[in-house]
Image (cartoon, grey):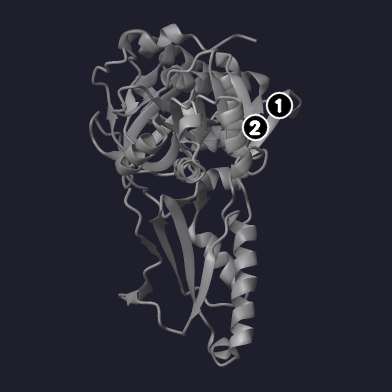
């Protein structure tokens, strides 16, 4: 299997990168046309064939893909390789019960791990380091991606997964972890636990690679001060492989996109028009080396800006800023994607009217998540014991749907504020 790590490509000229992208895009479009009938139909509807795509300048001719397409094509409709050639899946949390499943060949896994290896190297990682991976493993991409990247760099890898903080601290101190990979909110919690247990002088951490949820510059500074490290951002989507699509270098002025594997565009989220560099809009990715799940022009719904300003690290890959918001209603809470439609589905299934409000805040660098739900008139007249039971039942149902615990508070009918007849569904008090 070919090695796509190729650190030399990270400092190639923009012309060399564009030529590589042109070649890989043409090949990938042909691969998708030949092997993914779902996308071929979308191309035919737009009157486009592989012969129309000569390079990146023709990318705008291709149709978009969005998450709804991935759900509609679930599970195998966007598969680009025989199932016998696939070695793994990963999955999102799902919105209305139908998850997005991404497939990987061994080539895809190698590619993804190489991208994560670049992120670790950019954070100062070498084979002399001990890399503690405290992202979740399993269907979630975080743990597996950084685990494989750590191996590629040659670090001693501690596959801790998330949670069990006492064990995290034990291994961190006993084995001398120098790089920690986890969500920023968990890093903040680890920092507090380290101080509470008087372990600050016993840890050897120098860097942290944090992603999967939004975090502010103030939060970065707080984590860096408390742990005595440099905190690096990392970006990715299950749909495009996982973490490692883009990563931060020591300049900490944006995340370099691995342009030899992903072509980035910024579009107007309303019109789909491609915007010039420096304009704020929705981020779109085309994966040009993936085999099993080769998405073309995938709309991430993340709002950001791309920049090709020269970076002090010497890398020439384009940079993306931290996502500045969403063009849809998705929330990221403790690293989990949460859609209001998920909550609405649960409420309807449990016999409630879909009058609710999500309140998200950040307390001591950890997300709080509360769902206010209007009671039916019948329940409102019931006993406190019955209301309490209904709240507990909703907590269980929501956790089953979302994969994350929410506090549920049942409120009086028609008590949630409405604006022009429509309830305000989300109150996000976090400073992002």
Q: Is residue 296 visible?
A: no
Asked if residue 335 shows in the view, the reply is: yes
Q: Are marks 2 and 1 in contact (CB under 8 Å)?
A: yes
Q: Is residue 257 left or right of residue 98?
A: left
Query: Which residue is under mark 1?
Result: 86
x then y, percent, for residue 197: 52, 43
What mark, if any, has residue 383 been given in the picture? none
Expressed as whole percent of the image width and height from the top left, the position of residue 59 reads: 39, 26
Q: Is residue 87 left or right of residue 165?
A: right
Q: Nearer the viewer, residue 33 or 264?
A: 264
- Whether residue 124 is situated above or below residue 205 in the rendered picture: above
Q: Residues within 10 Å of mark 1 (few under 14, many from 20)?
A: many
Q: Residues within 10 Å of mark 2 (few under 14, many from 20)?
A: many
**Viewport quadrant of the N terminus:** top right
**Residue at image x 36%, y 8%?**
12
Which residue is nearer to you in this view: 163 or 286? 163
Q: Secondary structure at mark 1?
A: strand
Residue 315 rendering spot, x and y as whole percentages: 34, 14
The label number, if any, that marks residue 103 in the structure image: 2
Q: Indicate the quadrant where residue 280 lies.
A: top left
Identify the mark nearer the N-term, 2 or 1. Answer: 1
Q: Position of residue 354 (x, y in %)?
A: 50, 73
Q: Residue at x 56, y 54 (%)?
A: 95
The relative height of residue 408 versus residue 381 in the rendered view (above or below) is above
Compare residues 33 and 44 and report the one nearer the observer. 33
The residue closer to the viewer here, 45 or 90, is 90
Asked which secondary structure carries label 2, the reply is strand
Spatial separation of the CA atoms under disc 2 and disc 1 = 7 Å
């Amino acid at each position: 299997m070919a090695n796509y790590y190729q650190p030399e490509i990270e400092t190639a000229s923009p012309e060399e990168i564009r030529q590589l992208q042109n070649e890989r895009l043409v090949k990938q479009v042909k691969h998708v046309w030949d092997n993914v009938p779902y996308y071929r139909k979308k191309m035919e509807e737009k009157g486009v064939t592989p012969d129309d795509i000569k390079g990146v300048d023709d990318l705008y001719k291709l149709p978009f893909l969005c998450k709804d397409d991935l759900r509609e094509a679930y599970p195998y409709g966007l598969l680009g390789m025989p199932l016998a050639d696939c070695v793994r899946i990963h999955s999102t949390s799902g919105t209305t019960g139908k998850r997005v499943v991404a497939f990987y060949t061994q080539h895809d896994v190698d590619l993804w791990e190489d991208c994560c290896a670049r992120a670790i190297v950019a954070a100062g990682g070498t084979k002399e380091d001990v890399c503690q991976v405290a992202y979740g493993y399993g269907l979630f991409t975080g743990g597996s991606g950084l685990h494989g990247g750590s191996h590629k760099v040659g670090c001693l890898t501690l596959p801790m997964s998330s949670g069990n903080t006492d064990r995290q601290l034990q291994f961190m101190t006993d084995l001398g972890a120098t790089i920690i990979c986890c969500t920023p909110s968990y890093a903040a919690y680890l920092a507090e636990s380290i101080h509470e247990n008087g372990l600050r002088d016993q840890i050897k951490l120098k860097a942290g690679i944090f992603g999967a949820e939004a975090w502010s510059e103030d939060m970065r500074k707080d984590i860096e001060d408390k742990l005595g490290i440099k905190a690096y951002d990392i970006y990715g989507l299950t749909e495009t492989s996982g973490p490692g699509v883009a990563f931060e270098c020591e300049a900490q002025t944006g995340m370099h996109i691995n342009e030899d594997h992903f072509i980035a565009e910024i579009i107007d989220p309303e019109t789909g028009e491609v915007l010039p560099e420096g304009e704020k809009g929705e981020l779109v990715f085309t994966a040009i080396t993936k085999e099993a799940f080769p998405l073309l022009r995938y709309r991430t719904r993340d709002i950001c800006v791309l920049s090709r300003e020269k970076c002090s690290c010497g890398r020439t890959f384009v940079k993306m800023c931290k996502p500045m918001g969403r063009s849809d209603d998705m929330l990221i809470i403790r690293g989990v994607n949460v859609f209001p439609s998920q909550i609405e589905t649960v409420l309807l299934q449990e016999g409630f009217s879909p009058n609710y409000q999500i309140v998200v805040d950040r307390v001591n660098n950890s997300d709080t998540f509360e769902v206010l739900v209007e009671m039916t008139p019948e329940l409102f007249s019931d006993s406190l014991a019955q209301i309490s039971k209904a709240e507990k039942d909703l907590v269980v149902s929501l956790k089953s749907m979302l994969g994350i615990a929410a506090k549920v508070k049942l409120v009086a009918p028609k008590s949630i504020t409405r604006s022009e007849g429509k309830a305000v569904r989300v109150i996000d008090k976090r400073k992002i």
